[in-house]
């Protein structure tokens, strides 16, 4: 079995689950934050919409430099429709990049740098799982707490929730 065939089901599941959670974000609460040091609900939703694009970067480049490659900060989106449109576009790009990559390209070293200094170097497959999949799971969990605090019913992710049995 090819490595990508192991990754695709996990990627598809996590992206579909994330989309279901994002779809529950109430537009009227996008400016709300649970604590002064926390992101706004719209900020975390925007961040989630961008994470799949990081997977594209990992799959198409051998490294990422936090200083040299960082572009302009992402503008916080203001509606769930905008978040879902961006998320869907980035998921589509990431899935296409994943289906096009070769086995050999998945195991070459990928590096995270800061101003030219290598902070970590891991096989590309590990970087993709960490920066695209695990990262989205982490922030999706944060968003579920935000939604719960706003009284929004949570959709199933890995099974039933207290709000939905299926």
Image: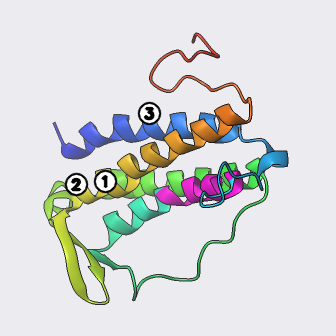
- 30 to the left or right of 84: right
Upstream in sequence: badge 3 or badge 1: 3
Question: What main secondary structure does the magenta stretch of the protein show?
Answer: helix
Q: Which contiguous range is marked in magenta?
A: 41-51
Dot 1: element: helix
Task: Check disc 2 and report the residue beneath it.
Answer: 126
- 164 to the left or right of 104: right
Above-or-below relation of 151 to 129: above
Determine contact: label 1, label 2, CB under 8 Å.
yes
Upstream in sequence: badge 3 or badge 2: 3
Task: Check disc 3 and report the residue beneath it.
Answer: 13
Residue 127: say if magenta.
Answer: no
Dot 2: element: helix
Q: Quadrant of the N terminus?
A: top left
Q: CA distance from mark 3 to mark 2?
A: 18 Å
- Pinpoint residue 83: horizontal percent, then vertical percent: 68, 53
- Pinpoint residue 147: horizontal percent, then vertical percent: 67, 36
User: Label for residue 130?
Assistant: 1
Q: Residue at x 78, y 53 (%)?
A: 79
Determine contact: label 3, label 1, CB under 8 Å.
no
User: Label for residue 89?
Assistant: none
Colour convention = rainbow
Mark 3 or 1: in front is 1
Q: Quadrant of the C terminus?
A: top right
Crowding around mark 3 (Cα neighbors within 10 Å: few <14, some 14 to 19, many 20+) is some
Q: CA distance from mark 3 to mark 1?
A: 15 Å
Q: Residue at x 39, y 89 (%)?
A: 68
Crowding around mark 2 (Cα neighbors within 10 Å: few <14, some 14 to 19, many 20+) is some
Above-or-below relation of 28 to 124: above
Q: How many marks?
A: 3
């Amino acid at each position: 079995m090819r490595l990508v065939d192991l990754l695709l089901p996990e990627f598809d599941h996590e992206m579909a689950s994330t989309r279901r959670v994002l779809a529950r974000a109430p537009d009227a609460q996008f400016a709300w934050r649970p604590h002064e040091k926390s992101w706004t609900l719209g900020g975390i939703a925007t961040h989630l919409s961008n994470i799949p694009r990081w997977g594209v970067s990992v799959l198409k480049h051998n490294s990422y430099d936090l200083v040299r490659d960082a572009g302009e900060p992402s503008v916080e989106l203001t509606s769930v429709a905008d978040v879902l449109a961006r998320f869907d576009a980035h998921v589509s790009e990431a899935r296409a990049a994943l289906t096009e990559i070769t086995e050999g390209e998945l195991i070459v070293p990928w590096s995270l740098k800061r101003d030219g200094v290598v902070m970590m170097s891991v096989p590309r497959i590990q970087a993709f799982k960490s920066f695209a999949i695990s990262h989205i799971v982490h922030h999706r969990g944060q968003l579920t707490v935000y939604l719960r605090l706003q009284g929004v019913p949570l959709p199933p992710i890995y099974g039933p929730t207290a709000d939905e049995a299926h």
